[in-house]
Amino acid sequence: MAGAPRGLTLNPLPRGHDNHQDVRMNQVTISEEDRRALGLWAADCVELVLPLFEAEAPSDTRPREAIEGIRAFVRDGRRTGRLRAMAWAALAAARDVDDPAATAAARAAGYAAATPYIHPLSTPHQSRHALAPAVYEARASELAAGDDAAVGDGEIRRAIGHAPPEVRELLRRMPPRSPGRGRLDTLYFELDSALRR
């Protein structure tokens, strides 16, 4: 569409429930290569904190299976119902442990397995899905270190250093994140801002 930034098009969505208002939302192009690069980056970030969960719930394999599932997607490129179920299962595992670091690690695994399912919409919500695995990995690491923000900041720098060009370009097609108020918001903002450079 003329005037739209590269990678963005305006597509009307169905009318709202009340049929009084047209809703329009920018869409982005997300290739299968983008999805695989995002999934691989997410898996590489999250795998580092899986031992935090496994120490608290040694017999619960759901987060590790989610990471194995996203790695299988990276290899064969097929989004399956099984992968989506693995993502949900890892998120459920996060609710089943009492340790905050283990909870964050399991959430990171669930969000990593869900990365192939982000919608091609230019919204902060979708960029949040793309960033969540690295953000929750950083949060798990800092919680395990006694809530030391310097540890989380270091993990964010590591994630930035390992982010492939496809992930950076994908985020540039979405609106930037605002700083927010809480620690998770700060981690999202730091990661998002740096990946756009």
Image (cartoon, rainbow, N blue to C red):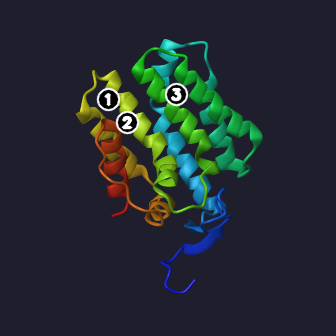
Q: What residue is shown at x 53% (from left), y 24% (from top)?
A: 94
The answer to which quarter of the image holds residue 152 is top left
* Disc 3: which residue: 106
Crowding around mark 3 (Cα neighbors within 10 Å: few <14, some 14 to 19, many 20+) is many
- Answer few, some or many: residues within 10 Å of disc 2's Cα (few below 14, many 20 plus, some between 14 and 19): many
User: Residue most toward the bottom?
Assistant: 2
Q: Answer yes or no: do the residues labelled 1 and 2 have beta carbons within 8 Å?
A: yes
* Front one among 146 and 44: 146
Residue type at mark 2 is Ala
Residue that badge 1 annotates: 142
Kindly identify which residue carries mark 2.
138
- Look at the image and tell me whether residue 112 can be seen: yes
The local secondary structure at tag 2 comes to helix
Q: Secondary structure at mark 1?
A: helix
For mark 1, does the 10 Å Cα neighbourhood hold few (<14), some (14 to 19), or many (20 or more) residues? many
Q: Which mark is residue 73?
A: none
Q: In percent of the image, x 75 and y 37: which residue is there?
A: 82
